[in-house]
Amino acid sequence: AAAQAQAEADKATAETEAAKALDNAAKAAKAQATAEKNAETAKAAQAKAEEDAATAKTAQATAEKNAEAANSKVSDLTEQLAAAVKQIEELESSGNVDEALKKQVAELKEQLDAAKTAQNEANEALAKAQDVAAAKIAAAEAAQEKAEEEATAAEKAQATAEQTAKEATEKAAAAEKAQATAEQTAKEATEKAAAAEEAQKVAEAAQAEAEKKAAEEKAAADQNAAEKVIEKINAIGKVHKTNSSENAIIAARSAYDTLTDDQKALVTNYDVLTKAESDYDALPQTGMSGFHKVFAGLAALMGITGIGLIKKSRKEDDDE
């Protein structure tokens, strides 16, 4: 019973531990799912950031190309204007001023001013594109770093979930083993209890049989003893004031007194004995001395037949 109780306690403990382990495994799996979702979100954000960075780099490249073209145009116009101005100066020094050339110089100046304005705008656009590209690249790098962190967290959560699931499986197996042990112990206890009960039944049946046999043997022995006394009483016959009657009565009385109470109850002719004793005492004395009567009485009380002793006593009296 103690072993069964201990097995049941171990089973309950194992089941509790298994339940906790399963709960932890569920929490770990949920944490893993959350980490994986965060990793996917971070990965998507990284992809978007990289796409934005690529777009910014393309815009930067376009701005650089535009700025380069504006710079080239400004450089060309500057050279053309310088050449035209030099030509005008040479004409003015020779006194030959060409109005068409002056007009051309004026147009070149206007073009140069427009080119410089475009150059400034291109440079500003380039600077802005560079700033945007730098920000997008930084964002992409940050997104990549976050994605890597989330991926690491997801891997760690996965490892934790796998370890927790392993522990839960082991504890569940331990709970099943404890349950099997408890069931086996209970089965063995039940079998032992049944065997003990069967053994008790067998022992009780054997005891009952032995008691029955002993009772039968006792009854037979009691009946046999009672029959012998009955025979002795029947052997008294008709009572006379003789030694033979006296001896028969004494022998019957002595035999009866040695019986147990149960055996005495089986003597069906005890009244014959008591009547014989009464009848004998009522007969007149024919020669038996008071000593002989006392001696016979003592012999009866001592469980002795008394016949031999009385005869011996009579013989000794005769010899005297």
Image: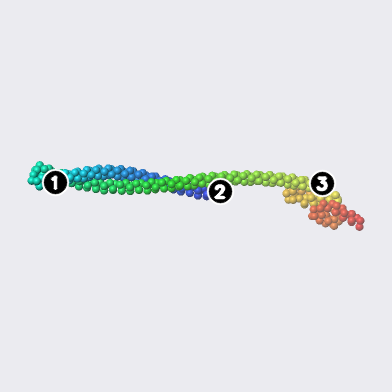
Q: Is residue 123 left or right of residue 285?
A: left
Residue most extreme to the front: 94
Disc 3 is placed on an element classified as: loop
Q: Residue at the spot x=25%, y=44% of the render? A: 64
Q: Secondary structure at mark 1?
A: helix
Q: Position of residue 71 (x, y in %)?
A: 21, 45
Q: Which numbered disc, 1 or 3, marks the residue that appears first in the sequence?
A: 1
Q: CA distance from mark 1 to mark 2?
A: 119 Å
Amino acid type at image mark 1: Lys
Q: Residues within 10 Å of mark 3 (few under 14, many from 20)?
A: some
- Choose the circle earlier in sequence order: 1 or 2: 2
**Residue picked out by circle 2:** 4
Q: Which mark is residue 235?
A: 3
Which residue type does callout 2 highlight? Gln
- The residue that appears at 81% across and 53% down in the rendered structure is 304
Q: Quadrant of the C terminus?
A: bottom right
Q: Position of residue 175 (x, y in %)?
A: 51, 46
Q: CA distance from mark 1 to mark 3?
A: 191 Å
Say which label, 2 or 3, has the lower sequence index: 2
Q: Position of residue 270 (x, y in %)?
A: 76, 48
| Element under disc 2 | helix
Q: In the orientation shown, which residue stands out farthest toward the right?
A: 319
Say left or right for 64 vs 83: right
Indicate the position of residue 82 as horizontal and vertical percent values: 15, 46
